[in-house]
Amino acid sequence: MAHNAYTVTLIPGDGIGPEVTEAACRVLEATGLSFTWDVQNAGAAVAEREGTPLPDAVLDSIRAHGVALKGPVTTPIGSGFRSVNVGIRKALDLYANVRPALTLPGLPRSHPNVDLIVVRENTEGLYTGIEHEVIPDVAAEATRIITRRASERVVRYAFEYARRNGRRGVTVVHKANILKITDGLFLKVAREVAQDYPDIALREMIVDAMCMQLVVQPEAYDVLVTTNLFGDIVSDLCAGLVGGLGVAPGANIGEHIAVFEPVHGSAPDIAGKDIANPIAATLTGALMLRHLGEREAAAQVESAIASVIAAGRVITADLKSGLPGARVVGTRAMADEIIHNLLTN
């Protein structure tokens, strides 16, 4: 076992966040690596106490350590405080959102042979939140901003990721046939960047056709790169192909800082009941290990999760459908099963 030590900002989040992050931390520690968790709180409860859901201390901790593991945080729909997720990404300039979707053999709801990476631009587009009422309660307007700088660096990240990980191609996903200026710029920049990577095949796909193709033949695609809103939607579709958000990890990458968080939400309706699926958070922890250079430990975690799923003896409630022989277990028990597999194989 390894004995390297790391200090990591830990943001438990709210809802099921504290439960799934606690499970993920236990699995990561079982690899033999040593972690000091700098626990920082963000979210609704913090907003009530401090007047903001994202205190400066959270951002200061992430800047100091360079890496964070984050649980889901509730974002009210329509009104209320600003999204903590968007706030962290903008404040730390985490320009690339990376969401893998990988088939775990044994999950009956998953499509076979999926091995996709969605790279989503993380700092602009419609998610800048520049919007206003044109006529109060009658019409509203949002501004979508696409820049050459942001487009180039996220596309280049996608190509570098493909090259570094032996991937065969990058598909740029766009809507330049309708959004001719904004997505037109994104597509133009992607074509220019692709010229620097002759060893990586470039494909172009309109976003609606991409969604259809992902449902019909997801195994035909590898790395996808797209703008902020399209990436949010397409990555959730890809999660659905491999079993749902409960098995979907995610990462937010900047120049010198990375924040790792599962794709799923905070699910406040099941918070504190020990029934949430910790797999997405644990796979997110494995992504963090790879970022830290601990590829062997990451592979151990991923292999342990895959083995538990393939064995089909235990499963969390969200993945029970189609597995009549599996025993439903809670968050802590699933983490225990993964740890047991990790330590005995």
Image (tube, rainbow, N blue to C red):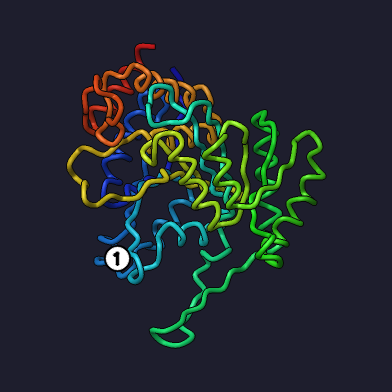
User: Which residue is rendered at x = 37% and y = 27% of the image?
Assistant: 108
Q: For the point 21% across and 28% down, which residue is it?
A: 329
Front residue (pair 311, 55):
311
Residue 75, quarter of picture = bottom left
Question: In the picture, residue 148 is in which quadrant?
Answer: bottom right
Q: Residue at x 43, y 52 (%)?
A: 61
User: Which residue is at the far left?
Assistant: 273
Locate residue 175, reporting x and y percent: 64, 58
Q: Position of residue 278 (x, y in %)?
A: 32, 35
Badge 1 density bin: few <14, some 14–19, many ≥20, Cα 10 Å: some
Q: Amino acid at mark 1?
A: Ala
Read off the residue under disc 1: 47
Give coordinates of residue 29: x percent, y percent. 36, 28
**Quadrant in which residue 218 is drawn:** top right
Residue 48 appears at what percent x and percent y? 25, 67
Question: In this picture, is 136 found above or below 203?
Answer: below
Quadrant housing the C terminus: top left
Report if residue 245 is visible in the image.
yes
- Does residue 35 appear in this view? no
Residue occupying image coordinates x 54% and y 66%: 126
- Going by the picture, which residue comes out furthest to the top? 345
Secondary structure under badge 1? helix
Q: How many marks?
A: 1
Taking 36 as reference, is 143 left or right? right
120 shown above or below 143: above
In the rendered image, the quadrant that contains the N terminus is top left
Outermost residue to the bottom = 135
Side of 74 relative to 125 (left or right): left
Residue 321 vertical position relative to residue 308 in the rendered view, above or below: below
